[in-house]
Image (cartoon, rainbow, N blue to C red):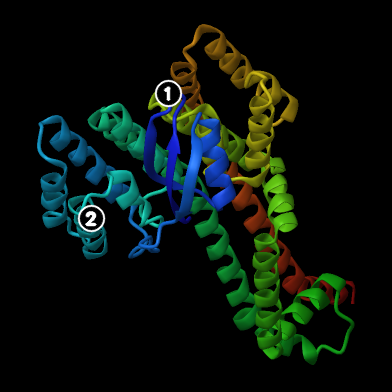
Amino acid sequence: MPAFVWKGKNRLGEVQEGVIVADTRDQASATLKRNGLQVLSIKTQATATKGFGKVKARDLAIFTRQFSVMIDAGLPLVQCLEILAAQQPDKGFQKIIESVRGDVERGATLQAALAKHPKAFSDLYVNMVGAGEAGGILDVILQRLSIYIEKAVKLTSKVKGAMTYPIVVITLAITVVTIIMVKVIPVFSQMYEGMGSSLPFPTIVCIAISNVLINYFYIVGIFVALIVIGLRQYYKTINGHLQMDALFLKIPVLGDILRKTAVARFCRTLGTLTSSGVPILEGMDITARTSGNMVIQNAILKAKDAVEQGRNIATPLAETKVFPPMVVQMVGVGEATGALDAMLSKVADFYEDEVDNAVSALTALMEPLIIAVLGGIIGFIVVAMYMPIFNLANVMGKD
């Protein structure tokens, strides 16, 4: 995302300036106005770059925690960045840190320096650092960021772990069935050619599938590749992205995991942002973009629009019918008591535990299901191949 250099007046008439990250100039201006600033000028930051590339979440978490400790110990910002760059094993990340250090040394704010590397530092990261700089609590904000990143990594690894086992088993099953079809079935097919009697329907089906895989494997490969490419291209469209994300949420068990993961991420992100002093509207905007699901994203943006019109957060969240009633109620209590950030953090903890339980349930369900399906397929093939022999034995027995 591009960075914009702005200058404006606050409610006291004091001139302020800084850098803000947004999709467009209009969005940046609107965000500044919502924060009570009269915009005097706003322009694209000419020095903003796309950075050197992505950074592993684990490396970012370690960097952030070490950065927090150094700031808390009273080390100057430039010296902290210099030490962190020197001990960073990832050469790409090392270059990013050195670039950030150089910008800070030349007088840029840490927020502006980080904003030049959107692939490494997300909107959430940049805005929280900006809030920490403005409030003089950069060490506290960095500590919260490191905890947030660590929890996000843990949550993502749980979901990936839940998907790894069934994917590996399904891939193995497809491989085994393909080998049987290509290597074993042709032997039976040649044996049955000289029998001179009609074959049972299941046997004909197995032999036909085997012939297609052997003689037209390239067509099958192209067909499968076209389907995969077509689905990926469709997912890149707005309607396709929305429809497929909605479909994912409706899948039994897996959809429940995805929904709970999105809710946990929403609560954790918004809670971390609000506790760090980021305005609620800006926080909801960032949270929507990091939700990971377009259905959840649209629901958050609808709620944000309602809040912008003066309503509370809980009611529009309930109207979207995407968030569970417990989340809505807890958010409502948090708003009423003035402890929204703490309440969101508790909800996030609860749903992260729920993801744990759902992942365990999925693993327990998938194992017997996959075994049953694989056993059924192989059993069908075996029976289909031996049916002509059984039929021949019956005929010979009658004679």
**Residue 21 x, y percent position in the rendering:** 45, 48
> For this view, does 244 lie left or right of residue 158?
right
The quadrant in which residue 9 appears is top left
Is residue 103 shown left or right of residue 383? Answer: left
Q: Amino acid at mark 1?
A: Leu
Confirm whether residue 361 shows in the render.
Answer: no
Residue at the (33%, 54%) spot, across then down: 56
Q: Is residue 251 visible?
A: yes
* Front position in the image: 3 or 215: 3
Mark 1 vs 2, N-terminal side: 1
Q: Which mark is residue 76?
A: none
Picture quarter containing residue 29?
top right
**Type of amino acid at the residue the image marks with label 2:** Ile
Q: Which residue is mark 1?
A: 12
Label 1 sits on a secondary structure element that is loop
Above or below, 190 against 289 in this view is below
- Reading the image, the residue beneath label 2 is 97
For this orientation, the residue located farthest to the top is 337
